[in-house]
Image: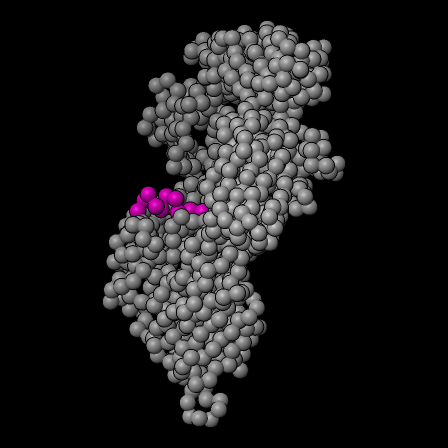
């Protein structure tokens, strides 16, 4: 009984000590874990285990960092000389590491890189790839810094350090340890993780005895790979003893996998006194079943060899199997090079298993028409595909035509000639840019196939040549120009007068000219859009001065953007022109609020009249589906092509057909104007001299101080936008002869280099830098009053 009571007392003390640990220690912050610990050789470039960095949400703040260091004389390397392999002294420097942070959906340019997944194990990541910076410190050491936390409310903080090419120092033996070292105050913990082992044990060598050429798959001429042990047990007992990873675009086929024992073996099943037999399964469910020595099974682009029992005598086995093309947009013609991974020590890090072939044909465009940006139903030039001799187009091979990022397919064609068919086979990818055709049959004489009357839809504002990239397995590659893209209208300003903030000022007259007749669509609105913070003081005069375009002059109006500012001028179009027409807008007056920076006022032409691609009614009509809606999939010829964006737009990020400058903002000199600015806690609205404006984050109270977004609070006290600087977790405000600096997470404010201790700290909330307003205002010479009843802050400048 006494021992039990004593044990309970000890446990209670331990529990109390655990609760007293300070927040942010390595115990609470997270862990480093190697996802693999491969056995490797010394004096070679090797792939080491990937390290998962798993940090508790809230532990990391912007500016936190950690260094990762490999043993002395190890090197992070890459293929510097372009000979196809990374070697000793080809060290990754700052130029490489700065580009070595990618998301899960982006291909890394270098073998050593940081992956920042959007999600991991069903959890959203607090970080994005843009939040993380890598700094080169030495050939074996890097520093990772978190500059921002994009999704602070997400489920976890995850990073993966991929060690794809590391030079192992000659003579090194034992565990390869990666040391994590974080500065005091960082949310990253210190730690050590084993990412590989250097051993003098047996090795495995690979030999490809049949390297077939193919277009779709290798079933007509299978691949043969011999795997040799130099000593028994070189193929280590492991669920992933060897793993052969195909390049992007290819997969291992699941059928017709054969394993033949060439020499050596695992057991003596026939009683001849020799271990010259092997039991093999191709079912991954047999991994761990001792009745089978080997389990060989494909998993998409990975061929996995699991060893349930180590060999009794050094063995050689031959695999006969096939690969196929999974995604022709990713599959690269030429050698198909497999990466060799797994727990067994292998002489090769990669092997060539097949050749993905190209075949000669020609592709050209008959004519190059002019098409209109922002519009549907834009017909490109006819595309001609011609065999040099009969049989050049091989049945089963493919042709892929890929549009640039500012275009998508609208209408597709097929053709047949001399016994060969070019059949449309769908849209690789999900963005509607790549269209694939498949060759069927064999030509009786040199065939000439023509894809006619095909159409595209084009992003507003896009101009220049419409260039298509040609690829596929039919021997075609390169680029062809299929159209010349122009905008439906141009806009010019008669002059560019100066306008002052807070006053009603005249702007330059605008002239909108059609590129061709009928370019502006009828029964739609033409919109002139002003920048944020600039609005029309009154409705200007709009008239057609040339041509026969019909506008509803009585319906011309200013339209509130988001219900707050009159920064749209809406021009209803009643009838399209039969000759190119010109619209004149005169009597324009602007009012600019204090958030508008000095410089040009850029006027943009928008609206369904010049951007059909973003008008849901037009999109439905063009694709023949009256039920299409926001985020629906668009089908062309029965194949899913792409997904619509918000409001059913094809190009939701772009709606501007043309733009020009018709005024320049000037800010009154300091002291010329008095300003009274009022912010209210919990409200994104604030007023400047009684004029209402909008922020994207509302003020809030914390630790007895009112926090306001730095950009708005600084501008409110007269700091010009270009004098609000952000760098390395620091905010710098410059006004006249005063320079004020804040550091995120610090309560020390510097005024012209002199430290002033505040009673609260600067911080980041919802992606915005928030500063204690009273300290900002007083440092820059403004008077501040707080009304606790109305929960308002009033600043007088």
- 95 lies above or below 266: above
Residue 430 position, x and y percent, is 59, 45
Question: Residue 95 in magenta?
Answer: yes
| Residue in front for this viewpoint, 532 or 780 | 532
Q: Is residue 141 above or below residue 542?
A: below
Left or right: 701, with 67 as reference point: right
Is residue 501 visible to the viewer in this orientation of the structure? no
Q: Residue at x 33, y 25 (%)?
A: 752
* Relative side of 353 to 696, left or right: left
Percent x, y for residue 93?
30, 47
User: Image height check: is 751 above or below 674?
Assistant: below
Could you say where residue 742 lies in the image, as x and y percent from the top left? 40, 32
Question: Against 287, is 664 above or below?
Answer: above
Q: Nearer the viewer, residue 175 or 325?
A: 325
The answer to which image quadrant residue 43 occupies is: bottom left
Q: Based on the displayed image, in which of its 4 quarters is residue 122 positioned? A: bottom right
Query: In the image shown, does 16 or 472 lie closer to the viewer?
Result: 472
Q: Is residue 324 visible?
A: yes
Please name the residue shown 50% across and 25% down the image.
712
Q: Which residues are magenta?
A: 93-105
- What residue lies at 26% left-to-right and 54% top-to-bottom? 89
């Amino acid at each position: 009984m006494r021992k039990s009571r004593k044990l309970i007392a000890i446990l209670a003390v331990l529990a109390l000590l655990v609760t007293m640990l300070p927040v942010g220690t390595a115990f609470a912050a997270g862990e480093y874990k190697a996802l693999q610990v491969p056995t490797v050789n010394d004096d070679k470039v090797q792939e080491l285990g990937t390290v998962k960095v798993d940090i508790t949400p809230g532990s990391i703040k912007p500016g936190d960092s950690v260094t990762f260091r490999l043993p002395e004389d190890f090197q992070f390397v890459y293929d510097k000389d372009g000979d196809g392999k990374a070697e000793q002294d080809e060290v990754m420097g700052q130029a490489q590491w700065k580009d070595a942070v990618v998301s899960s959906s982006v291909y890394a340019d270098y073998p050593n890189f940081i992956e920042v997944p959007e999600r991991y194990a069903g959890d959203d990541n607090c970080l994005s790839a843009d939040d993380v910076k890598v700094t080169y410190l030495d050939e074996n050491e890097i520093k990772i810094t978190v500059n921002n936390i994009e999704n602070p409310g997400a489920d976890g903080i995850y990073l993966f350090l991929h060690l794809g090419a590391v030079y192992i120092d000659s003579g090194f033996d034992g565990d390869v340890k990666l040391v994590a070292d974080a500065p005091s105050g960082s949310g990253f913990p210190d730690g050590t993780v084993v990412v590989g082992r250097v051993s003098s044990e047996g090795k495995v060598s690979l030999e490809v005895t049949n390297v077939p050429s193919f277009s779709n798959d290798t079933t007509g001429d299978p691949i043969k790979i011999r795997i040799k042990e130099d000593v028994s047990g070189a193929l280590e007992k492991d669920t992933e003893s060897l793993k052969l990873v195909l390049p992007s675009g290819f997969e291992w086929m699941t059928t017709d996998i054969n394993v033949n024992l060439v020499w050596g073996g695992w057991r003596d099943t026939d009683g001849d006194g020799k271990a010259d037999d092997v039991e093999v399964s191709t079912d991954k469910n047999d991994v761990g079943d001792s009745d089978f020595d080997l389990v060989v099974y494909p998993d998409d682009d990975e061929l996995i060899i699991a060893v349930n029992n180590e060999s009794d005598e050094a063995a050689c086995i031959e695999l006969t199997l096939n690969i196929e093309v999974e995604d022709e947009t990713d599959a690269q013609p030429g050698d198909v090079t497999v990466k060799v991974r797994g727990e067994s020590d292998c002489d090769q890090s990669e092997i060539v298993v097949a050749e993905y072939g190209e075949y000669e044909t020609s592709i050209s465009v008959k004519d190059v028409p002019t098409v209109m940006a922002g519009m549907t139903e834009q017909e490109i030039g006819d595309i001609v595909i011609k065999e040099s001799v009969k049989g050049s187009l091989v049945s089963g091979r493919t042709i892929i035509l890929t549009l640039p990022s500012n275009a998508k397919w609208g209408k597709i064609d097929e053709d047949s000639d001399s016994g060969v068919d070019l059949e449309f086979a769908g849209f690789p990818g999900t963005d509607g840019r790549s269209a694939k055709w498949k060759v069927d049959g064999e030509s009786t004489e040199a065939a000439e196939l023509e894809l006619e009357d095909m159409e595209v839809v084009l992003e507003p504002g896009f101009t220049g040549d419409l260039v298509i990239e040609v690829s596929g397995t039919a021997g075609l590659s390169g680029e062809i120009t299929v159209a010349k893209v122009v905008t439906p209208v141009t806009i010019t300003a008669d002059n560019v007068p100066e306008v002052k903030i807070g006053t009603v000022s005249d702007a330059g007259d605008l002239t909108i000219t059609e590129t061709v007749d009928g370019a502006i669509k009828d029964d739609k609105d033409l919109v002139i859009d002003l920048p944020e913070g600039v609005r029309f003081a009154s409705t200007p005069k709009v008239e057609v001065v040339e041509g026969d375009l019909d506008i509803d002059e009585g319906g011309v109006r200013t339209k509130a953007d988001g219900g707050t500012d009159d920064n749209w001028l809406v021009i209803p179009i009643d009838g399209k022109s039969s000759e190119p027409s010109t619209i004149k807008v005169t009597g324009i007056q602007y009012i600019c609020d204090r958030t508008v920076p000095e410089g040009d006022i850029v006027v943009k032409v928008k609206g369904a009249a010049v951007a059909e691609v973003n008008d849901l009614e037009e999109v439905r009509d063009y694709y023949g589906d009256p039920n299409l809606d926001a985020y629906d999939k668009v089908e062309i010829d029965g194949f899913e092509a792409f997904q619509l964006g918000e409001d059913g737009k094809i190009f939701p990020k772009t709606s501007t057909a043309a733009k020009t400058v018709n005024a320049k903002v000037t800010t009154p000199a300091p002291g010329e104007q008095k300003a009274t600015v009022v912010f209210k806690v919990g409200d994104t609205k604030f007023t400047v001299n009684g004029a209402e404006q909008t922020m994207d984050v509302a003020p809030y109270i914390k630790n007895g101080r009112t926090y306001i977004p730095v950009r708005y609070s600084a501008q409110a006290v007269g700091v010009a936008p270009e004098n609000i600087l952000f760098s390395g977790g620091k905010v710098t405000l410059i006004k006249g002869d005063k320079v004020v600096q804040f550091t995120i997470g610090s309560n020390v404010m510097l005024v012209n280099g002199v430290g002033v201790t505040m009673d609260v700290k600067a911080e980041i909330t919802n992606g915005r830098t928030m500063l204690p307003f009273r300290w900002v205002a007083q440092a820059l010479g403004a008077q501040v009053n707080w009304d606790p009843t109305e929960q308002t802050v009033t600043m007088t400048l």
